[in-house]
Image (cartoon, rainbow, N blue to C red):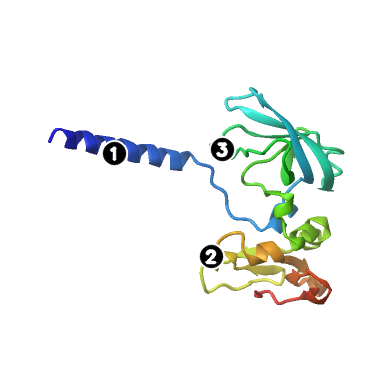
Amino acid sequence: MRSLPLLLAFLLFSLVCLMYQASDACSCAMSHPQDAYCHSDIVIRAKIVGKKLMNDGPFGTLRYTVKQMKMYKGFEKIQHVQYIYTHDSESMCGVKLDINKYQYLITGRVHDGKLYTGLCNFIERWERLTLAQKKGINHRYQLGCNCRIKPCHSLPCFVTSKNECLWTDMLSHFGFPGYQSRHYACIQQKEGYCSWYRGMSARDKLSVNTTDP
């Protein structure tokens, strides 16, 4: 019987550890790739070629050396990106990237002339992006930066102004990222109205209303 109190104590300790880890974890709001593009200072496609741990504060900072393939946004802030910075700890939203393996689409913010990124920024292997996302990064997302993508977490949902597109991926049973994230951009049309735009092929280059799909 003496083992029962020990077991209960162990279970209580484990629960406390799990609660601590959950409270210490990085937490990010879901974001459509277009919002990530529009709210970022820099958007590049790059390959990671090296990394170094920098001890420049209470928490370690990882400095990744990158080979920039193309810059899509941010020419006026940094002419050419050689390094990107992130927290060493994933609990502080630091991001772990593979060396000499993949090309990444990387978004981030500039502070003191340095590009910072993390788990709450949009980072994805280039080959995993859909054709619509690649076209969005190239030019379409820029056309919608004056629009507002309004998340819908539960029904009913409505647009409340002409510059809004209703984002319903969170209602899907297929998880995130959903169909709108992968295949649609919210583009400003005539008279300031915004609507979802799907442009995967010549016959699919059409505008759809704010609630489609």
| Crowd class of label 3 (few under 14; some 14 to 19; many from 20; radius 10 Å) | some
Number of residue marks: 3
Q: Residue at x 83, y 43 (%)?
A: 69
Mark 2 and mark 1 lie on one chain; the one further toward the N terminus is 1
Q: Which mark is residue 90?
A: 3
Q: Residues within 10 Å of mark 1 (few under 14, many from 20)?
A: few
Q: Which residue is mark 2?
A: 153
Dot 1 or dot 3: first in sequence order is: 1
Q: Is residue 146 visible?
A: no
Asked if marks 2 and 1 touch (Cβ < 8 Å), the reply is no
In x, y percent, where is residue 38? Answer: 74, 54
The disc label shown at residue 12, or none: 1
Task: Say which element carries label 2.
Answer: loop
Residue at 69% in and 56% down: 33
Q: Secondary structure at mark 1?
A: helix
Q: Callout 1, which amino acid?
A: Leu
Is residue 198 placed above or below 77 in the rendered structure? below
- Residue 161 % position (x, y): 68, 71
Indicate the amino acid at tag 3.
Answer: Glu
Q: As rendered, which of 104 and 24 lies closer to the eye?
A: 104
- Does 41 sit above or below residue 48? below
Residue 71 is left or right of residue 95, and the answer is right
Quarter placement of the C terminus: bottom right
Q: Position of residue 27 (x, y in %)?
A: 54, 46
Q: Which of label 2 and label 1 is nearer to you?
A: 1
- 130 horizontally vs 69: left or right: left
Q: Which is closer to the viewer, label 2 or label 3?
A: 3
